[in-house]
Amino acid sequence: MNTCIHKALLNNVLMTGCLILLCLRIQGQAAESSSGRVSLLFIGDIMGHDTQIWSAEDRQTRTYNYDDVFEHVKPVISGADIAIANLEVTLAGPPYKGYPQFSSPAALAAACRDAGIDCLVTANNHSADRGAKGIRATIFRLDSLGIPHTGTFIDIASREKQQPLMIERNGISVALLNYTYGTNGLPVPSPQVVNMLNRERVAEDISGAKGLNPDIIVLFLHWGTEYDTIPSQQQQEMAEYFLSIGAGLVIGSHPHVIQKMAWYNDGSAFPGRAVVYSLGNFVSNQRKPGTDGGAMARIVLEKKDGAVKVADAGYILTWVYTPVVGYRLKFYILPCSEFSRKPEFFTKKEDYSQMMRFITTSGRLLTRENLNFKEYSGKGSE
């Protein structure tokens, strides 16, 4: 081969190789600096009072169905990448009963799953309502339904193996931990475990979760004072402490009413982190002002250059509509922003007025108390 031609071919090969390496390097740099986003939806107390159980029962077949409870809010739930809710009943089997020691049909959890709820937290003050059997049955039934859960465990070995609950979407990993302030004075029979809200315990678990290298650690806490719309000093001190030792989000339930939400921006003590003190009731038969609805917190996480922080945060008000249908009280969870524009949907003007009072009162509270949390309409638009 002519020497000049050989050299020219060699130079072309070398240049082509360099271009390929350069392209690979650029692609690698782009991958390293790429960003990912995931939307989290946190949902408050899912309860099961006697009237709710009777409403879901088919009198002839003695079966239960709760699907229509969630039909109006299902598009909002399924619009999130990850939806997490507090299951404040046991699934202990019959006799099914509401307050004070709850046991609901497993159909309630199945309806949650079918509505788009991805996982349930089970550590709350009603976890031990049906003793050891209730704790075990709840776990087994959630497992059989394919619903991830955390907060209560068969034994310590299961707790150590299954905690934290790891969830991953869109390249972002979430470590979920769940605790309750207590179990209404009822003992938790050994070897079953209900996670108790203890600073040292939670700090130890946060440290353990860090060893799994999650992008963010989320605490779902059952805490606070029932029916008080202002977080207690203890709640606020705990939230700040847990954020300071590594929690990225602190989400609260139990008061059965809404409490304030705070998203800390850059320049604050906890940049890119957030606290929701109480989500209120998602569904229940409580009808006193403030307890007849709640808020779903929608938090968007963004991963950029390997770091994850809150990129957007807001809430969606929901209200429980309880009309009489076919001589039976029914339960429907309504997204308030949508149904505030549909007065013709309600069979009674009083029902629409009650929902509007909830919207007005909740809006005033959150406008006054919230930090950087805005109200969302539907799936996440303002």
Image (cartoon, rainbow, N blue to C red):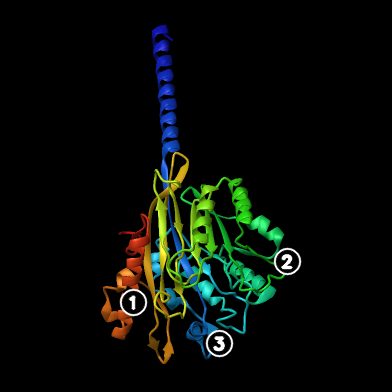
Instruction: Residue 139: give its label.
Output: none
Real-space Cα separation, disc 1 to disc 2, in angstroms:
44 Å
Real-space Cα separation, disc 3 to disc 1, in angstroms:
32 Å
Residue linked to disc 3: 62
Nearer the observer: mark 2 or 3; the answer is 2
Nearer the observer: mark 3 or 1; the answer is 1
Residue linked to disc 1: 355
* Above or below, comparing residue 201 to residue 77 in the picture: above
Across and down, in percent, residue 119 comes to 53, 63
* Above or below, comparing residue 214 to residue 128 in the picture: above
Across and down, in percent, residue 27 comes to 42, 34
Residue at 46% in and 76% down: 67
Q: Earlier in the sequence, mark 3 or mark 1?
A: 3
| Residue 20 appears in the picture as rendered | yes
* Above or below, comparing residue 96 to residue 221 in the picture: below
Q: Amino acid at mark 1?
A: Met
Q: Are marks 3 and 1 in contact (CB under 8 Å)?
A: no
Q: Amino acid at mark 3?
A: Arg
Q: Earlier in the sequence, mark 1 or mark 2?
A: 2
Instruction: Determine which quarter of the picture holds residue 344.
Output: bottom left
Q: Residues within 10 Å of mark 2 (few under 14, many from 20)?
A: few
Residue linked to disc 2: 191
**Relative to the observer, which residue lies in front, 123 or 159?**
123
Across and down, in percent, residue 66 comes to 48, 78
Is the C terminus in the top left, top right, bottom left or bottom right quadrant?
bottom left
Across and down, in percent, residue 341 comes to 26, 73
Q: Amino acid at mark 2?
A: Pro
Real-space Cα separation, disc 2 to disc 3, in angstroms:
33 Å
Which residue is situated farthest in the top direction here? 3
Which residue is situated farthest in the front direction here? 233
